[in-house]
Image (tube, helix red, strand yellow):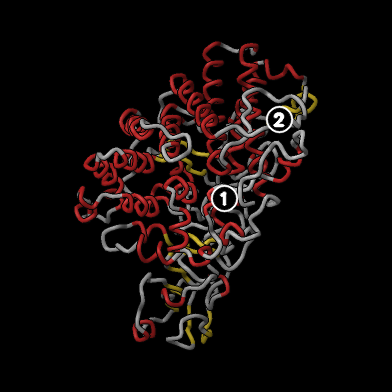
């Protein structure tokens, strides 16, 4: 993909700094231009550059180490692997505090994005563009501003609510209530929806691919209402509104579930498909994979790094491009492997979610085995199976009969475990290269169905909720197993929702927010995640406010901070 928001645009004080922002067509001819006057944003090109740049802050959270750490670490389905930073988010111990740099980076970058949207919205009346362009870009900015505030309120609770462009440094900040934040998010999305194009992702194409659309805004608003329904700002009609919006996305835009679950994650041309509602764009060109803070400068989509086991030191194997770099950051819990993905006869998602076979790329004779105690030596030719993960226990005799190592659940460790393959990136130029080029799918239609099912179930509409979830389950069935995957209303409850979202969305930066929304983060982590069970407590339903934000805020008359820290930090 070649992103619309290929470079960044920042509004700083009374001047604007432009770092490109051209269309896809002339992406390679971009020049860095500085010292642009403050009125540049009012020109047709400046207005377009600024509106494109507002999207770039999405990259700070989605498909980044920061966003993944704050959305998948320390849940009921993922726990800590052998290596990596930020383990406090897995353990909920003293390492999770207000000084953690990625918390500060996410906070600051989301506010940079918000300030860019504010600048475009405020300056739109003076921009020398057509009324149609002005209305469309303002709608996009409201979608993005709502999106950024939605991430913030889920992670931190009430935050500083800024709806005007900040032109210079200020120490005057305060925490709005959750109710005020949700009111603003909803108002922005309700204002944006009528003015956004009703277009499905696969037909969007060209230089406009990746911009906000009507179905993207409706999907986001549906999720906002679903989340608000369990917040301090909840209202009696939240679930009904969520269901109406989700149904609109499903029914009104020619979006459809792909026939095969695995095809959703095909890299390259497959990234633009009928199931994508909204994606965050990346590219193979490292110069374009930046956000306005440069905290993601050239990083690209990095999710391919974090879910891999240590295959590369096993006999018959070495690191290669196809199998990726195994950072061993996230290891699936026993609950995810043995309960959520228990049905492997009818449901294709275990097989298509996890990599189970490694072919030898470092052959040799009489190689010492490492984890399979059923044999002492193996001999491998290039292309032979070197490692196989059956996902269930095999007897010693069953394993001994195989000419390769078999990794069974009883031998899983923090370094050896089923590897999530959704985000593997074999298109990288070499085996050490970290930036990934695949787009990150932020919203897809399967989740829209799951939002609908949850909202309907919460309204007592069990039959309708069952139909919605069955659409996702039937798509996931092996050929000929659709009937076996179809559930009946008596099987439909919240546990089905909990597990179905895990089966469908494992690793897709939703789980921590899901558990918080359901109000069972502490309960389920204690039950299913031994690494985190000891320390987690109810205060962990919020992240700590970055200490930099507190320190930069002017003090109250009594000397206390006027930007209160979240309890427990």
Residue located 76% across and 37% down the image = 558
Asked if labels 1 and 2 touch by Cβ distance under 8 angstroms, the answer is no
Q: Is residue 53 above or below residue 510?
A: above
Q: Is residue 6 visible?
A: no
* Left or right side of 16 for 512: left
Residue located 56% across and 44% down the image = 155
Q: Which residue is mark 2?
A: 10
Q: Position of residue 125 (x, y in %)?
A: 61, 12
- Asked whether 307 or 19 is in front, the reply is 307
Badge number at residue 231: none
- Element on which disc 2 rests: strand
Q: Position of residue 7 (x, y in %)?
A: 66, 34
Q: How many marks?
A: 2
Q: CA distance from mark 2 to mark 1?
A: 25 Å
Residue located 67% across and 21% down the image = 46
Q: Is residue 4 above or below residue 510?
A: above
The mark that comes first in sequence, 2 or 1, is: 2
Q: Is residue 275 visible?
A: yes
Residue located 65% across and 22% down the image = 164
- Element on which disc 1 rests: loop
Disc 1 residue crowd, few under 14, some 14–19, many 20+, Cα 10 Å: many
Q: Which residue is mark 1?
A: 70
Q: Residue furthest right?
A: 35
Q: Position of residue 428 (x, y in %)?
A: 58, 53
For marks 2 and 1, give the one nearer the viewer: 1
* Left or right side of 541 for 103: right
- Asked whether 66 or 299 is in front, the reply is 66
Q: Position of residue 24 (x, y in %)?
A: 58, 31
């Amino acid at each position: 993909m070649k992103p619309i928001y290929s470079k960044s645009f920042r509004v700083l004080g009374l001047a604007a700094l432009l770092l490109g922002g051209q269309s896809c067509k002339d992406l390679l001819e971009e020049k860095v231009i500085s010292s642009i006057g403050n009125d540049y944003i009012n020109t047709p090109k400046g207005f377009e550059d600024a509106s494109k740049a507002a999207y770039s802050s999405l990259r700070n959270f989605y498909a980044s180490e920061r966003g993944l750490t704050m959305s998948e670490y320390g849940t009921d389905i993922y726990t800590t692997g052998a290596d990596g930073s930020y383990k406090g988010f897995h353990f909920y111990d003293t390492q999770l505090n207000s000084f953690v740099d990625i918390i500060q980076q996410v906070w600051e970058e989301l506010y940079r994005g918000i300030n860019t949207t504010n600048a475009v919205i405020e300056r739109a009346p003076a921009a020398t563009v057509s009324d149609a362009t002005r209305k469309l870009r303002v709608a996009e900015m409201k979608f993005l501003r709502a999106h950024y505030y939605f991430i913030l309120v889920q992670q931190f609770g009430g935050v500083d609510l800024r709806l005007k462009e900040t032109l210079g440094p200020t120490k005057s900040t305060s925490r709005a209530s959750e109710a005020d934040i949700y009111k603003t998010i909803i108002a922005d999305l309700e204002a944006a929806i009528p003015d956004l194009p009703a277009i499905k992702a696969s037909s969007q194409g060209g230089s406009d691919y990746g911009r906000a659309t009507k179905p993207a805004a409706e999907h986001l608003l549906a999720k906002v209402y679903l989340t608000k329904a369990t917040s301090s700002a909840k209202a009696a009609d939240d679930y009904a509104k969520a269901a109406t919006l989700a149904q609109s996305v499903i029914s009104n835009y020619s979006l459809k579930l792909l026939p095969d679950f695995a095809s959703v994650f095909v890299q390259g041309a497959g990234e633009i498909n009928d199931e994508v509602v909204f994606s965050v764009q990346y590219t193979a060109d490292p110069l374009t994979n930046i956000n306005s803070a440069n905290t993601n400068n050239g990083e690209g989509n990095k999710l391919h790094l974090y879910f891999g086991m240590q295959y590369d030191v096993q006999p018959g194997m070495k690191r290669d491009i196809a199998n990726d770099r195994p950072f061993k950051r996230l290891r699936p819990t026993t609950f995810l492997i043995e309960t959520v993905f228990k049905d492997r006869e009818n449901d294709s998602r275990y097989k298509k979610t996890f990599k189970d076979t490694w072919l030898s790329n470092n052959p040799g004779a009489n190689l010492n085995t490492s984890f399979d105690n059923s044999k002492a030596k193996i001999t491998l030719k290039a292309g032979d199976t070197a490692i196989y993960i059956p996902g269930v226990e095999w007897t010693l005799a069953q394993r001994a009969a195989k000419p390769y190592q078999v990794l069974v659940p009883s031998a899983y460790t923090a370094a050896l475990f089923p590897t999530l393959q959704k985000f593997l990136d074999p298109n990288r130029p070499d085996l050490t290269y970290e930036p990934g080029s695949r787009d990150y799918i932020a919203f897809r239609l399967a989740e829209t169905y799951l939002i609908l099912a949850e909202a309907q179930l919460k309204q007592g509409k069990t039959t309708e909720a069952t139909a919605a979830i069955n659409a996702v389950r039937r798509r996931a069935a092996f050929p000929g197993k659709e009937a076996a995957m179809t559930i009946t209303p008596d099987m439909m409850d919240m546990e089905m929702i909990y597990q179905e979202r895990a089966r469908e969305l494992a690793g897709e930066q939703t789980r921590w927010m899901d558990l918080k929304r359901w109000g069972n983060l502490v309960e389920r982590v204690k039950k299913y995640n031994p690494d985190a069970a000891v320390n987690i407590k109810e205060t962990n339903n919020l992240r700590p406010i970055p200490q930099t934000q507190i320190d930069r805020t002017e003090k109250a008359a009594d000397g206390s901070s006027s930007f209160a820290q979240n309890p427990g930090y």
